[in-house]
Amino acid sequence: MVEEKRGTVFAGRYRLIERIPGGCSTKVWVVEDLKKHNPALVLKVFESLKELDPAIVELLTNEFLSLNLRHPAIVMPTVFSVAGSIPYLVMPHFHRGSLRGVISRQRTSGPVREEEIIRVCTQVASAMSYLHRNSFVHQDIVPENILLDDDGRWVISDFGFSRILHNTLGHTFGPNRIFHEPYASPERFVSRSANAPDDVFSLGVILYELAVGRLPWEGRGGRALLDGEIPPLSWDDQYSEELQDIVFRCLSKRPEQRPTASELEQWASGYSIPTAEEIRRSREARKRREQEQEEENKRRIEAIRIQSEIQQKERQKAENAIREALERERSKKAGKNHNQRGEAGSRSKHDLKAREEAERKAREEAERRAREEAERKAREEIERKAREEAERKAREEAERRAREEAERKAREEIERK
């Protein structure tokens, strides 16, 4: 284990200068390389509770040496080795700090500008897209691993180049200690393994934290989406709806509903920052649409209720007509029986059957007409609703196209100016 004391020399080469916050299963120090007299390095030590198998050490070393990744927003470790039983990495030190500092300063300096959020999204998504195209998954996208270089670019460090290393740490410490739960996707809590959509989810949490000033779902991460009903997310209205929509897509429960890192990079690169007035108008338009939709839903519910009452009345009316017809037939039969009682004995069985058949046909005819009338009204109602639905969709499509055209012209006007 690393002795937590300044001035201690680790691995016979690196003098510990300052302890800085590390990951779930690591200790991180700013160090001086005594061989090269370079004080601007970071030593990242992976704690271990047992001796590593020499075969695993060899696999890790060969895996590191085979890396051939080059991207301006990815910080590559310069050294990977093992001191005793402890694997460690050495990488450049970024004195301008990490994204965690930006998030922490929100409490005093106020909200992060939308331009800066988009810049973080563009540069981090670009690095993630490069990793994913080369079959790597970062596995730990958190603010501490997003650093600001001397050129003002946001870069990512500590990417998970080694599944062997992560699996070894998982067996040693348990799977929950090798990723940050507040930034972990739902599937990390189920399968533990990491895939490209998990990185996108983690970036979505960071973008949400930058915009809102706090973690979603009270810091429970994707675990909150596995506990039944999904808790609603709040949003700061000073940011655009388009940014809100893309962040919420990144935070989708299902991986296939999230954008890819490449899609996220493409969106952010082409995104035009709206003015405060444009955001205000967009919010007002959305509220109007929501109110109109709510009113339309109320009208539909009321129309269904009225139609149900009409159908009930029509059924009752048809049933009453049938009963009245039957009652008239019975009355006629009773009158004939009274007037012709003396002749009853002489009536033939054939006449009796004829009357019964006539009564049956009268009942069936009354029932048939009632059914046809009810069916006709039902068909008319269905056709009316279909027409209204088609008209509504046509109106919505026309409004959508008009909004898109207006937004396009506004963007072109902004770009022209």
Image (tube, grey):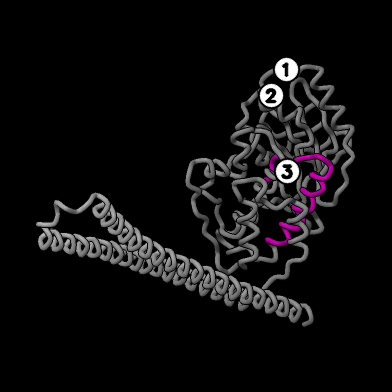
Amino acid type, mark 2: Ser
Relative side of 397 to 292, left or right:
right
Residue ID at (85%, 38%): 78
CA separation, marks 2 and 3? 27 Å
Q: Does the residue at mark 1 contact the one at mark 2 (Cβ under 8 Å)?
A: yes
Other-residue count near label 2 (Cα within 10 Å), few / some / many at <14 / 14–19 / ≥20: some
Work out which quarter of the rendered image holds the C terminus and state it. bottom right
Q: Are marks 2 and 3 in contact (CB under 8 Å)?
A: no
Judge by depth and name the residue closer to the eye, 126 or 39: 126
Secondary structure at numbered mark 1 = loop
Secondary structure beneath label 2:
loop
Q: Position of residue 275 (x, y in %)?
A: 65, 75
User: x and y percent of residue 181 in the render?
Assistant: 59, 40
Q: Is the residue 77 above or below the residue 330 in the image?
A: above
Find residue 332 and report its image quarter.
bottom left
Tag 1 and tag 3, C-beta contact below 8 Å: no
Please name the residue shown 66% across and 23% down the image.
171
Nearer to us of marks 1 and 3 is 3
| 199 over 2 or under it: above or below | below
Task: Return the residue at label 2.
Answer: 48
User: Closest to the observer: 225 or 105?
Assistant: 225
Which residues lie in the magenta part?
Answer: 117-142
Q: Is residue 143 visible?
A: no
| Magenta stretch: helix, strand or loop mostly | helix
The disc labelled 3 sits on which kind of residue?
Answer: Ala
The residue that label 1 is drawn on is 51
Classed neighbour count for the residue bearing mark 1: other residues with Cα under 10 Å, few (<14), some (14–19), many (≥20): few
Reading the chain from its start, which is encountered first: label 2 or label 3?
2
Residue 112's label in the rendered image is: none
Cα–Cα gap, marks 1 and 3? 31 Å
Q: In the image shown, does 181 or 336 lie closer to the viewer?
A: 336
Q: Residues within 10 Å of mark 3 (few under 14, many from 20)?
A: many
